[in-house]
C-alpha cells in the first residue's frame, strides 16, 4: 500500500505534494516505480487525495506499473487515508480469495489486515470489538452495503453525541 494522500499544505504549490514535479515526473513516480519493480510485491494499492485518482492511474500507465490493484481516495487525516487503503487491501484479498483462493502468505496478510482494519473501525466509528468485526464481515459479504451500512455506537452516550 502506497499512501500519498496528503494535501502538502506545508509544501505549498498548486497541487498535492505527491503530484508536484521533480524533473519530468511527479514525486509519486519514484516510490510507485520502485514498488512495481520489487519482486516481493505482487500488488499495489495507491491512496491519493480525493479527485487525484485518475491522474495517479495515468501516471502508473505512463510508468508501465503493472502491479496497481487499485487507486483509492484518502481521507481528511493520515489515519483516515491509511484506513481507506487498508480497506481496499482487505476488499481486494477478499475478492481474490473468493475467485481463486489465497496463498498461505496472502491468507496471513488478509487475517492481519482485517484485524488492523477492525481495530481502526473500533475507534473511527466508536464500535465494540465484536461490532467492528461483524460490520467488516457484513461489508465484505455484501460490498454494496459498505457505503450505506450504519454502525452501532458501543455506548449509549456515543449514540446521542
Image (spheres, rainbow, N blue to C red):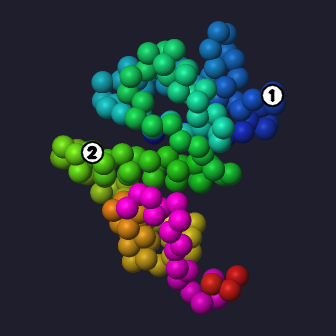
Q: Which residue is mark 2?
A: 96
Name the residue rendered at 44%, 15% in the picture.
64
Q: Secondary structure at mark 1?
A: loop
Q: On residue 14, which mark appears?
A: 1
- Please give left or right for residue 101 compared with residue 64 in the image: left
Quick one: which residue is furthest to the top in this view? 24
Can you see residue 87? yes
Q: Nearer the viewer, residue 68 or 130?
A: 68
Whole-percent x and y of residue 20? 70, 23
Query: Vertically, is 110 above or below 7?
Result: below
Whole-percent x and y of residue 68? 42, 30
19 magenta-colored: no
Q: Quadrant of residue 66?
A: top left
Name the residue rendered at 43%, 77% in the picture.
131
Mark 2 to mark 1 CA distance (whole Å): 38 Å
Q: Quadrant of the C terminus?
A: bottom right
Q: On residue 138, which mark appears?
A: none
Which residue range is magenta in the image? 142-158
Q: Secondary structure at mark 2?
A: helix
Amino acid at each position: 500500500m502506497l499512501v500519498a494522500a496528503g494535501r502538502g499544505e506545508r509544501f505549498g504549490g498548486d497541487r498535492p505534494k505527491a503530484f508536484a514535479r521533480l524533473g519530468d515526473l511527479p514525486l509519486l513516480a519514484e516510490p510507485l516505480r520502485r514498488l512495481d519493480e520489487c519482486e516481493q510485491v505482487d500488488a499495489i494499492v495507491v491512496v491519493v487525495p480525493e479527485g487525484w485518482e485518475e491522474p495517479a492511474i495515468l501516471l502508473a500507465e505512463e510508468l508501465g506499473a503493472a502491479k496497481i490493484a487499485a487507486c483509492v481516495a484518502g481521507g481528511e487525516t493520515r489515519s483516515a487515508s491509511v484506513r481507506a487503503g487498508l480497506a481496499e487491501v482487505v476488499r481486494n484479498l477478499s475478492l481474490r480469495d473468493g475467485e481463486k483462493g489465497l496463498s498461505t502468505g496472502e491468507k496471513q496478510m488478509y487475517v492481519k489486515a482485517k484485524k488492523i482494519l477492525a481495530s481502526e473501525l473500533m475507534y473511527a466509528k466508536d464500535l465494540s470489538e465484536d461490532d467492528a468485526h461483524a460490520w467488516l464481515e457484513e461489508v465484505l459479504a455484501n460490498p454494496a452495503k459498505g457505503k450505506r451500512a450504519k454502525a452501532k455506537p458501543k455506548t449509549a452516550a456515543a449514540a446521542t453525541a
